[in-house]
Every structure is written in structure tokens, then in C-alpha cells.
Image (cartoon, rainbow, N blue to C red):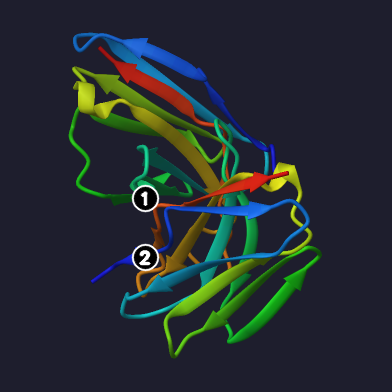
Amino acid sequence: ETGVTQTPRHLVMGMTNKKSLKCEQHLGHNAMYWYKQSAKKPLELMFVYNFKEQTENNSVPSRFSPECPNSSHLFLHLHTLQPEDSALYLCASSQEGGGGADTQYFGPGTRLTVL
Amino acid sequence: GQNIDQPTEMTATEGAIVQINCTYQTSGFNGLFWYQQHAGEAPTFLSYNVLDGLEEKGRFSSFLSRSKGYSYLLLKELQMKDSASYLCAERDSNYQLIWGAGTKLIIKP
């Protein structure tokens, strides 16, 4: 599936910068997700939105702030990040946000490096 | 606990068959997913199992045994393009996906 796009694909930022990651899905789905993927570790779910409402926040530090203006767009606002936040940030969408066979479709990710 | 275990890395030969195992220990079960992820790319959906048995899709098959908390992904007639990481994920009682760390599959000519 290539119906989920993410920008930018690569981002280098200093610890005092503020930046935003953008995700857009063209699949008509109602749920969107942010994940963090670090090398050799399982995907870590960060946030879930269902019909624009946040339904999950997995104890993510407040330096990560999500925004979901509509069912097709999802943002992750970043500020005062730490070097350990360097990772691949993946966005995903699914039809209904939780049913058994509900399948998540992923974007290509943003490779974030925090200096 | 919520552990998904799968081997870190496997190597196989082009044209051969490889089986990637996944075990899960979560209480509550609502399905098992397999995804493929090429380096630098998005994870892509391969299969979903919720009932015991084997699901076949072309060269790829996925097996589930709920009583054993066990699944495997079987890849036949391996091609070089199958070199990728394969992610196992279980949907738990809260309908969240719990992910394994992935198995990096290396295909040699």
C-alpha cells in the first residue's frame, strides 16, 4: 500500500529546535497512528486517533505533541528533543481503529536525528 | 507479560524455503499479523491469522496455533527481493498491536 505519505523523509534537528512531522492518508480510513521505530527494537505505539479523537497516548513525553485536524491528516510536533529520540517515526492508518482484522497501513517514515 | 519473540536474524539460499517463527505470551488474543519491511521503507501487510491453521498466499504462508501461542511465516521459492525484515505483531485483549523486534532475513545466491 502506498496510500500513506509522510514528510519530511529525513530530518536533522538540534535539541532546541521546533519541527513538525506530517502524515497524510488517501485510503479513506478513520484511524491514524504514530509509532517510533528504533534499531533492533519493537515498534513503539505513541498515539492513536479515531475519528480525529485521541484514544491512546502511551506515556509519551510532552516534548512530542500530536495533532489530528481531520481523518486524513496527522501531525507530530517536536520541541526540545533529546538525542535518544533519534529514530524512524512511522505513521499508519486503518479503517476502524481496533477491530480484530483491522489492518494498519504504514507510511515510509521520517528518519529523525537529534543532535 | 507482553512478549513477542522472534529470531533476530536468519540466512537462507535463493530458491529455498525458510520458516520464521514467532511466539507470544500476552493474555487475551485477537489475531496475529505478519508484515514485511525492506530497509528504509514502510512495513507492508502480509497476513492475518485469527483461527488455528495455515493460510496460504502464493509463495508466503502463515500458520497459527493459539493453544501454543505460536505462529510462523513460511516463504517458499525464495527470491533475492525477499531480503527484508519480517515483523510479527499480536492484537491483544485491548485490541492494540504488540510488536516483535523483527527478523532480518538475508538471502544468499
Three-letter code, disc 1: Pro
Residue B99 position (above or below residue B90): above
Quarter of the N terminus of chain A within the rendering: top right
Residue A84 position (above or below residue B73): above
Three-letter code, disc 2: Ile
In this rendering, position of residue A78 left or right of residue B54: left
Residue A33 quadrant:
top left
A47 or A13: nearer the eye? Answer: A13
Asked whether the viewer can see residue B88, the reply is yes
Report the number of numbered marks. 2
A35 or A40: nearer the eye? Answer: A40
Indicate the position of residue B11 as horizontal and vertical percent values.
57, 52
Identity of the residue drawn at 25% across and 12% down: A115
B13 or A102: nearer the eye? Answer: B13
Residue A47 quadrant:
top left
Say which chain tag 2 marks. B
The residue at which mark 2 appears reads as B4
Q: Residues within 10 Å of mark 2 (few under 14, many from 20)?
A: many
Identity of the residue drawn at 35% across and 37% down: A38
Asked whether the viewer can see residue A28, the reply is no
The residue at which mark 1 appears reads as A42
In this rendering, position of residue A81 left or right of residue B72: left
Indicate the position of residue B105 as horizontal and vertical percent values.
57, 50
Identity of the residue drawn at 48% across and 38% down: A91
Contact? badges 1 and 2 (CB < 8 Å): yes
